[in-house]
């Protein structure tokens, strides 16, 4: 599939999702309002990943692949000057409505993640959640480095492909929320050299080893117990992070 066809398929997929969500919001527009903890706590890696951005007050921040706009709202509430970018017109419309409903000012841009329409060193921070695995990293990573200021940092939360059993399950088993575009692939260990070729410091932290079972069992004491085991195992044996469901990448200039 050509790059143009891939981007068109990505846009159509996410515009379709956004239309379905818009139907729900048409009935319950109050759902656009939310407290920060709703976003920060919806996956175990979000809160610690966003903490990696540091104090964002007054900082120019790009939310790359902003989707429904919740991260952009959280960052704007913390005093950041946020630019939210997405390929999907439908998701940008939802993100605008969410920003308005929550009373924050955010700039919105429709563009490709592999060709960013910004001048060199435009941003102090870059945030992204489940976006890089949709992109051609050979094009996207140099662009990220180009627009990030010296001394800045970028933080990304991404599905990880280092666990062969998990990769098999992703491709073969049905589970809640299993929706993906035809060309997306989880990041793999071999992809890290692309980040290290552009950024002098690359941090990688895995999340959800045993607790990836939460995809099937969302709540209750079992999930809490698995989270506790993960905290212990991943701290004491960092090599286990290679087999986690998600990673948080922290890229520093």
Image (cartoon, helix red, strand yellow):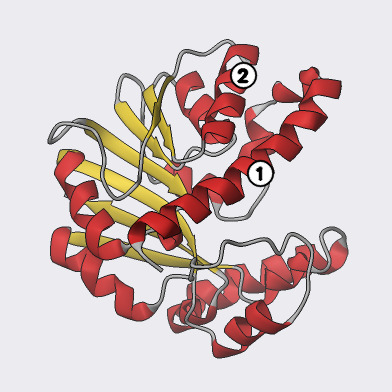
For label 1, the SS is helix
Residue at image x 29%, y 72%? 192
Q: How many neighbours does mark 2 have within 10 angstroms: few (below 14), some (14-19), or many (20 or more)?
A: some
Q: Is residue 130 visible?
A: no
Residue ID at (53%, 84%): 163
Q: Which mark is residue 16?
A: 1
Please provide percent x and percent y for residue 101.
Answer: 65, 14
Q: Position of residue 63 (x, y in %)?
A: 41, 36
Quarter holding the N terminus? bottom left
- As measured in the structure, the alpha-carbon distance from the residue carrying label 1 to the one carrying label 2 is 17 Å
Callout 1 environment at 10 Å: few (<14), some (14 to 19), or many (20+)?
A: some
Camera-side residue of 87 and 225: 87
Q: Position of residue 249 (x, y in %)?
A: 37, 59
Q: Does 242 sit left or right of 30 as displayed?
A: left
Q: Residue at x 70, y 36 (%)?
A: 19
Quickly name the residue at label 2. 97
79 to 44, vertically: above or below = above
Q: Nearer the viewer, residue 151 or 183?
A: 183
Please tell me the numbered disc located at residue 143. none
Contact between marks 1 and 2 (CB within 8 A): the answer is no
Viewer-side label of 1, 2: 1
Who comes first in sequence, dot 1 or dot 2? 1
Residue in the image at 36% along x and 37% along y: 111
Give the structural element (helix, strand or loop) at label 2: helix
Is 11 drawn above or below residue 122 in the view shown? below
Q: Quadrant of residue 44?
A: bottom right
Left or right, residue 107 beside residue 177: left
Please give left or right for residue 35 compared with residue 233 in the image: right
Image position of 253 with respect to 135: above or below: above
């Amino acid at each position: 599939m050509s790059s143009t066809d891939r981007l068109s398929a990505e846009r159509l997929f996410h515009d379709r999702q956004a239309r379905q969500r818009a139907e729900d919001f048409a009935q319950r527009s109050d759902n656009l309002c939310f407290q920060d903890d709703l976003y920060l706590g919806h996956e175990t890696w979000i809160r610690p990943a966003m903490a990696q951005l540091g104090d964002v007050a007054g900082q120019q921040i790009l939310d790359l692949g902003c989707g429904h706009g919740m991260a952009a709202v959280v960052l704007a509430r913390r005093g950041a000057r946020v630019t939210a970018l997405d390929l999907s017109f439908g998701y940008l419309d939802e993100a605008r409505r969410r920003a308005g409903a929550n009373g924050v000012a955010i700039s919105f841009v429709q563009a490709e993640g592999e060709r960013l329409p910004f001048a060199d060193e435009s941003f102090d921070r870059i945030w992204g959640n489940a976006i890089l695995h949709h992109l051609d990293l050979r094009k996207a990573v140099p662009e990220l480095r180009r627009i990030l200021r010296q001394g800045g940092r970028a933080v990304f939360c991404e599905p990880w492909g280092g666990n062969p059993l998990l990769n098999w399950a992703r491709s073969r088993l049905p589970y809640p929320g299993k929706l993906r575009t035809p060309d997306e692939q989880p990041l793999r260990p071999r992809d890290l050299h692309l980040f290290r070729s552009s950024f002098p410091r690359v941090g990688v932290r895995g999340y959800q080893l045993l607790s990836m079972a939460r995809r099937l069992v969302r709540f209750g004491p079992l999930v809490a117990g698995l989270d506790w085991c993960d905290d212990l195992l991943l701290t004491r044996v960092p090599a286990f992070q290679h087999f986690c469901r998600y990673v948080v990448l922290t890229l520093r200039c």
